[in-house]
Image: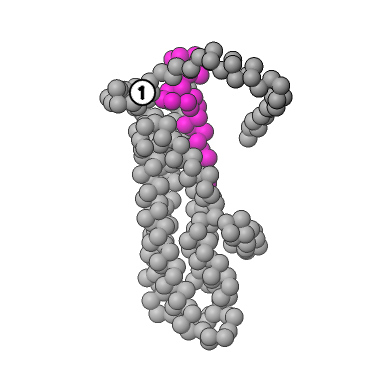
Amino acid sequence: MFVILKFFVDVIMSNSPNSGSRCNVSFSVTPKSENKKSRSSISGFSPVSVPDSPASPKTVNLTGNPRRIRDNAAELFNLIEDWNTHQLEGVSCITDIINLKFSLAEDDACELTRDYPPGISSLLENLDDTSGKMNDIIERMKVISKELHSISKLEYFRTTTPTPMFLTWPPEKYGESADIITEAYSKQLKLQFYIKENIAHCFNKSNAILYSAAWLYQPYIEDSINLLLEAMLKETGLK
């Protein structure tokens, strides 16, 4: 559904006058005649010893770069929680705007009224205020990305080896992940601004419903973005 929604959103925005690495995996199949030999060699397997993470209960009081990484990851999560709150506020505003325009249109008509119903101005002001708060969130996300990149550079010059700071991620992974998350939300913000600027001037019922769906479902914030954030929180011991 998100792919289809994103396609139609891209088409509308492009036509508006206002407007990695690859992992190679190889495997082999052991012939049946060699099964016994393979099983007998398992007894000689040596388990890998993993050092304790700085975020483990044994080291609750983090300091230095690990503490800064963890604090930035926590702030990124809090910013996204704030985004979700404002996003729902925007859904409410858009729903009220569309209902006002629908109330003046005939039931069987494909076109909405070209008049601006009373009360629509206050709703548009609320939507503009909500969009501004979401823009502030994106600006703070960009600052966090820069800080995480700076921390990874400091960590590299301190150790000169790409050792994980917590469990498995190397230092540069945090900045790269923050960049991916910030880029996705930045694209969604551009769509939010487009909807905010055009929803009052939308005179087609189908487009109005598309605008509402695009704001509600956020097609540029895919499941992989949420998974990446979850992985960052798990890595730093925040979850």
The residue positioned 54% from the left and 80% from the top of the image is: 112
Q: Position of residue 206 (x, y in %)?
A: 58, 73
The number of numbered discs placed on residues in the rendered structure image is: 1
Q: Nearer the viewer, residue 154 or 231?
A: 231
Residue 25 seen in this snapshot: yes
Viewer-proximal residue, 121 or 148?
Answer: 148
Q: Main secondary structure of the magenta part?
A: helix
User: Residue 177 colored magenta?
Assistant: yes
Q: Kindly identify the residue that appears in the image at 51 percent across and 68 percent down.
A: 199
- 239 falls in the magenta region: no
Where 23 falls versus 183 (above or below)?
Answer: above
Q: Give the residues in magenta.
A: 155-184
Residue drawn at 53 percent across, 61 percent down: 214
For mark 1, what is the residue? Answer: 54
Residue drawn at x 41%, y 72% is 96
Q: Quadrant of residue 63?
A: top left
* Badge 1 amino acid: Pro
Q: Reply above or below: 104 against 77.
A: below
The answer to whether residue 40 is above or below residue 227 is above
